Image (spheres, helix red, strand yellow):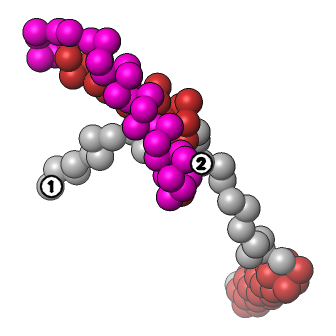
Amino acid sequence: MKIIRNQFNTKNRRKWDTKKLMTDETKRAYSTVVQNKLETYNESEIETEWTNIKATIIEAAEKTIGLRTREHTKEWFDEECQHMREKKTSKKEMDSNRNTTRVEQLQEVQTRNK
C-alpha cells in the first residue's frame, strides 16, 4: 500500500484573516489594490501572467487583510489532569514493585528447594 502525501505544505501555509473581508471598507481596499496592480501588467505568456496574478493577490492580502493571529484556547491540562497523572504513575510504580518482590520470593523458594 502506498501512502499519498498532502501536496501542500500546511505547516508553513499562510492563513489570511479573511474575517476582515466582511467589512465593506476592507473589501474595497483589497479589490482596489488588486485591480490597480493587475492593470499595470501586460503579458502575453501564460506562465508569466499567472505568476503576476498570484503575486498581486498575495501582495494585496498582505497590505489589506493581514495574517490571522492564533487564538489562545483554554488549557485542557489542568490541576485535575496533573493529579490523575501522578496517581496513575504512583500506581504503576506500586505494581512494578509488587511484581519485583513476587519474582524475588519465587527465586528464593526455588533456591531453597534445590
Residue lying at 27% horizontally and 12% vertically, measured from the top left = 41
Q: Is residue 29 magenta?
A: yes
Residue 97 percent across, percent down from the top left: 82, 81
Q: Amino acid at mark 2?
A: Arg
Q: Amino acid at mark 1?
A: Met
Q: Is residue 78 left or right of residue 31?
A: right
* Chain part drawn in magenta: 20-48
- Tell me the chief SS of the magenta region: helix
Residue at the disc numbered 2: 68
Residue at the disc numbered 1: 1
Q: Quadrant of the N terminus?
A: bottom left
Figure check: 39 above or below 1:
above
* Front one among 81 and 108: 81
Figure check: 5 above or below 78:
above
Residue lying at 65% horizontally and 49% vertically, measured from the top left = 69
Residue 5 visible, this angle: yes
Residue 70 percent across, percent down from the top left: 66, 53
Q: How would you rate the neighbour count of disc 1 (Cα within 10 Å): few for under 14, some for 14-19, many for 20 or more?
A: few
